[in-house]
Amino acid sequence: MVYIGRLAVAVAAFLTAAEASPIIQRPKNSTFSIQQISNPNYKRNGTRALQKAYAKYGITKGLVSVQSSVGGDVTATPESDDNEYLCPVTIGGQTLNLDFDSGSSDLWVFSTSTPSSEQQSHTIYNPAKSSTFKELNGFTWQISYGDGSGASGTVGTDTVTVGGLTVKNQAVELATAVSSEFVTDSANNGLLGLAWSNLNTVEPTQQQTFFANAGPQLQQNVFTADLRHDQPGSYDFGFIDTSKFQGNLNYVPVDNSQGFWQFTVDGYAVGDGATGGNSFSAIADTGTTLLLLDDNIVSDYYSQISSAQNSNSAGGFVFDCTEDVPDLTLQIGDYAAVVPGSLLNFSQNGDGTCFGGIQSDGGQGFAILGDVFLKAQFTVFDQGNVQLGFAPKA
């Protein structure tokens, strides 16, 4: 009887999913671009950025109290450096600003199902205002981070438009519970995951990402990230804009078995030093701010900065803001990916020290190449050929 009951649930789930199979509303060979917009509420803070990354990947090393480390509520302390950027997405005729995240695979939003105490100033998706919304009965989702934060809720399908390309019956995850880390960022109304669909958290049946559904209808089954320092960047889907990079693209194969854009880095160099070190695995993550590397690389890098120290109060490496910091080069196949020192001086701590853009990956087995790295490279996420391409920015 138990087996029959489970079989019935599985069949019902299959039929529900089949009825809601995604439909592309634009002819094959489509292309489109998305310009990022500034998040006016974002305040640059290195400790907060590192804690967010550690929480996302369940890294417990170096976790500190963000409030105690900066002497107050970090969101109330204005910083004049980079902003965090978001992208407009239309769901059921309603436009919300979402975080494009190549390190996850859920499309989730604040909604009318979110408790009013957690909605605050967010733009809320209301399925009742959409003539195309369909609930997926019995489907749920949950994102849980290592520090206890996260979000969860119910699932439906709706018409989703990004940059003019429309996917009907796209899975949309409606938040019924959201932790304070998401609530306090009122300009960010959810997340659009751009990793592989096998990382999606929907149960009982994983759902395809927007990019997975749209990819076959694109001119090329790719998207590119041209992230920028001190200005909005852009994402292009379906084509590669050769005016945005110099020279040739350098491709490396991707291991997507864990759902990430994961690849091999063959070595590294600090400043003008020779390339050395062992090869290591890394992922390209537009949803993480910093560059997280193996402790040996981190120690080697900061040994070249005389004032650098691993600060217990800040939760990571800091150094005197007046000191010049070296570039870091990661050798990826035949490509030398240079991250300039100007990007690796991430934020001021308010006491004359600055927080480094390079920090420990917590020994989790792969490095995380976040926006600090991606702002220095033009990057192609090639879904069709399961590879990543890199080139210097134009």
Image (spheres, grey):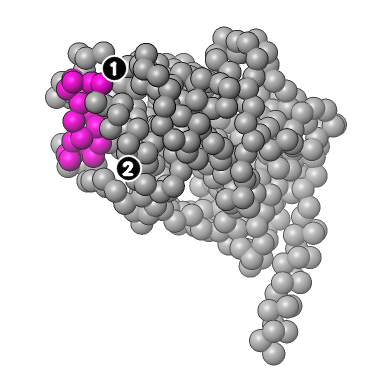
In the rendered image, the residue lying farthest to the bottom is 1
Q: CA distance from mark 1 to mark 2?
A: 23 Å
Query: What residue lies at 50% left-to-right and 25% top-to-bottom?
Result: 331
Q: Nearer the viewer, residue 207 or 43?
A: 207
Q: Which image quadrant for residue 159?
A: top right
Q: Secondary structure at mark 2?
A: helix
In the rendered structure, which amino acid carries the disc numbered 2? Gln
Q: Residue tagged by mark 2?
A: 51
Local crowd at mark 2 within 10 Å, few (<14), some, or many (≥20)? many
Local crowd at mark 1 within 10 Å, few (<14), some, or many (≥20)? many
Task: Locate the N terminus and report the quarter of the image it occupies.
Answer: bottom right
Q: Which residues are magenta?
A: 304-320
Query: What residue lies at 17% left-to-right and 22% top-to-bottom?
Result: 307
Relative to 125, 213 lies left or right: right
| Mark sitting on residue 325 | 1
> In the rendered structure, which disc, 1 or 2, sits on the residue that comes first in sequence?
2
- Whether residue 189 is visible here, answered yes or no, is no
Q: Secondary structure at mark 1?
A: loop
